[in-house]
Amino acid sequence: MKTLVPLLVAAALMAGCATNAPQTALKPRPDATRSLAKIELFYNEEDQFTVVDGGGSAIVGFAGLLGPVGTLVALGFEVGSRATLASRTERRSKEFMAAVKNDGTAATSLTLSRQFAEQFAARLRESGREVKLTPAFRVNGPLAEMQALGHRPTPGYSTLTMRITAAYGAPDATSSFKPFVAVEQLLRNEQQVVVYQSTHTADLEEPAYFMYDGLLQDARGAREGLRQGFAQAVRPAYSVMFGGDEPHLAGAAEPTRTAGLDAASGQSEMK
């Protein structure tokens, strides 16, 4: 069950990304996120790849109506009635993880999660901030409650906790498996008060695999597709949290507008 929970969460994220309507009212980002000059970034260092196939279960439709939490409930009903989706997701995810590790490329390079975290940290440093990068275990549970387990925040630093998700998904039995990446972020100030949270999700078109066996046999190419997805996600994931400029650090004066909500979930999408 411990393994299955994050897999279902990944499935819910994927479904939510595919069905969320564009947000029409964007709120100004609070100055609190821009003024933070020292940030400790916690991230899940180990890669955990998910392979989910709706197989006609219409999980995307459920997510559109009910949101991520409702999707998990809907998935539960699907599991109870057909006993296929959950077990298939868990089995295929384990097989894909093993294929990636056996390829050898993953063993000689940084994990995709760490690569993304380091690129994000570099972007923070470019803005003039001091950054401390701290690997941690993957955090489960609601975004608003994310906290790195077994770590105490460094005094004088704000904390940015990330949950990084990589997956391949097909919404139904006739669709191809395509890469999906998600970055959930929770930002706390030096007093560890939540000042902002956001989610960036990206559905990618390539590489696409019509059959699961094709995905499994091309583990190296599939991993590279996810790597490219994360590389493309650095800038929008940064912008949804910190904006396109930092007036307190870089001297700019114009406020930016984002799809995030202060101390509430924000989301950007890249199609």
Image: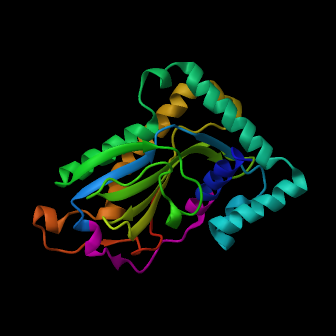
Residue 235 position, x and y percent, is 32, 53
Task: Name the residue: 29% across, 67% down.
Answer: 33
Task: Give x and y (percent) for residue 153.
Answer: 37, 55
Location of residue 254 with respect to 218 vertically, above or below: below
Question: Looking at the rendering, which quadrant does residue 101 occupy?
Answer: top right
- Render colour scheme: rainbow
Q: Nearer the viewer, residue 159 or 129?
A: 159
Is any atom of residue 170 visible in this view? no
Which image quadrant for residue 211?
Answer: top right
Residue located 20% across and 63% down the image: 245
Q: Position of residue 263 (x, y in %)?
A: 42, 74
Nearer-the-camera pick, 183 or 159: 159
Residue 20 colored in magenta in the image: yes
Q: Is residue 70 visible?
A: yes
Tell me if residue 225 is in the magenta stretch: no
Q: Is residue 185 left or right of residue 178?
A: left
Residue in the image at 32% along x and 66% along y? 189
**Horizontal relation, residue 184 to residue 4: left or right:** left
Q: Quadrant of residue 141?
A: bottom right
Horizontal placement of 235 versus 98: left or right?
A: left
Residue at the left extreme of this rendering: 251
Which range is magenta? Answer: 15-33
Residue beneath the point at 52% across and 46% down? 205
Q: Position of residue 130 (x, y in %)?
A: 21, 51
Q: How many tags in the picture?
A: 0
Kindly give the residue lying farthest to the right in the view shown: 81
